[in-house]
Amino acid sequence: MEIANESLIKLHHCRGISWKMIDSLLKVDPTLQLDNIPSFISTSLSPTMQREIVETIRSNHVEEQLNQYRYNHIHVITFFDPLYPPFLKEIYQPPWVLYAKGDLSLLQSKKKLAIVGSRMATLYSTKVIQKLMKELVAEEIVIVSGLAHGVDSIAHKLAIGNGGKTIGVIAGGIFHIYPKENRELAGEMMKHHLVLSEYPPLTKPQKWQFPMRNRIISGLSNGTLIVEAKKKSGSLITANFAVNEGRDVFAVPGNIFSSFSDGPNELIQQGAKPVLEAKDILEEWKHLM
């Protein structure tokens, strides 16, 4: 699959290329042999997109960028690469390419828990995650979250503080960490843990990328724990992705008078397992221990 890997990376750097466009091109030629460009490109693509693909493939621009990634110890992992996490292949529209910096062995961990919640988390979130984290990392469970404000940051920091391992999945590229307040945290994770993106490193984060990255957070994980979240929040999007992929959904019950507890409490009513202590998760995962 070496040809497909190289060609897929080139296609992934084309401006305006979408998941569906790459999917249609793979259906035309699963090996993505781009030697004969005119016969390769599907006529279903717009003339503008066809020109973009031709120009990208024929230029040295992508190779120059790949050299920059290598210099910065950023690994490029395609869907066809043996390093690509098997769990992630099971989701709807799995990313064609992952850009990763840090400990790649974490991708193969058999016990990963996504912890997500409100960006405006209260002290309750910190206390809950503090209570759970020591036992979770003692069982070598890797914590996955989105490197955002609030619950995400708390989960990453407490996993590190308790001697555990953590993966951050970001919107935008690795050269554009958002929010800027988490750049130091991201830097530490790139050295000793792992930061992932489905976008080339020079990509600036866009609003639509945040809900899209939630499918990767849940897709990497055996289950997702929602701590605090309002009814309409990205955390519930992550929970829905987990449900659709047949993964476990856990939720921390909260104060019925707090809007930050509406999301988890509603999930529990819908069948999510309530979590009061770490053993509530560990009991479900005895087969993984």
Image (cartoon, rainbow, N blue to C red):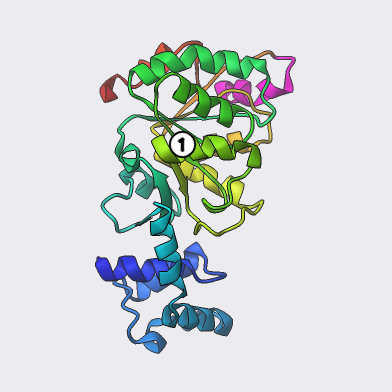
Question: Image point 68% across, 13% down: which residue?
Answer: 255
Nearest the viewer among 180 and 280 is 180
Residue 132 is at least partly visible in this image: yes
* Magenta span of residues: 256-271
Q: Is residue 48 left or right of residue 136?
A: right
Label 1: few (<14), some (14–19) or many (≥20) C-alpha neighbours in 10 Å? many
Q: Is residue 226 left or right of residue 159?
A: right
Type of amino acid at the residue the image marks with label 1: Met
Residue 193 is at least partly visible in this image: no
Question: Image point 51% across, 82% down: which residue?
Answer: 50
Q: Residue furthest front?
A: 71
Q: Is residue 5 above or below residue 38?
A: above
Nearest the viewer among 288 and 181 is 181
Q: Position of residue 77 (x, y in %)?
A: 36, 55
Question: Image point 57% across, 25% down: which residue?
Answer: 154
Find residue 227 and report its image quarter: top right
Nearest the viewer among 186 and 116 is 186
Q: Residue at label 1?
A: 189
Question: Image point 53% across, 79% down: which residue?
Answer: 52
Q: Position of residue 71 (x, y in %)?
A: 40, 57
Element carrying mark 1: helix
Q: Position of residue 221 (x, y in %)?
A: 41, 35
Q: Is residue 67 shown in magenta?
A: no
- Specify the quadrant that holds the C terminus: top left
Q: Is residue 197 left or right of residue 264?
A: left
Secondary structure that dominates the magenta span: helix
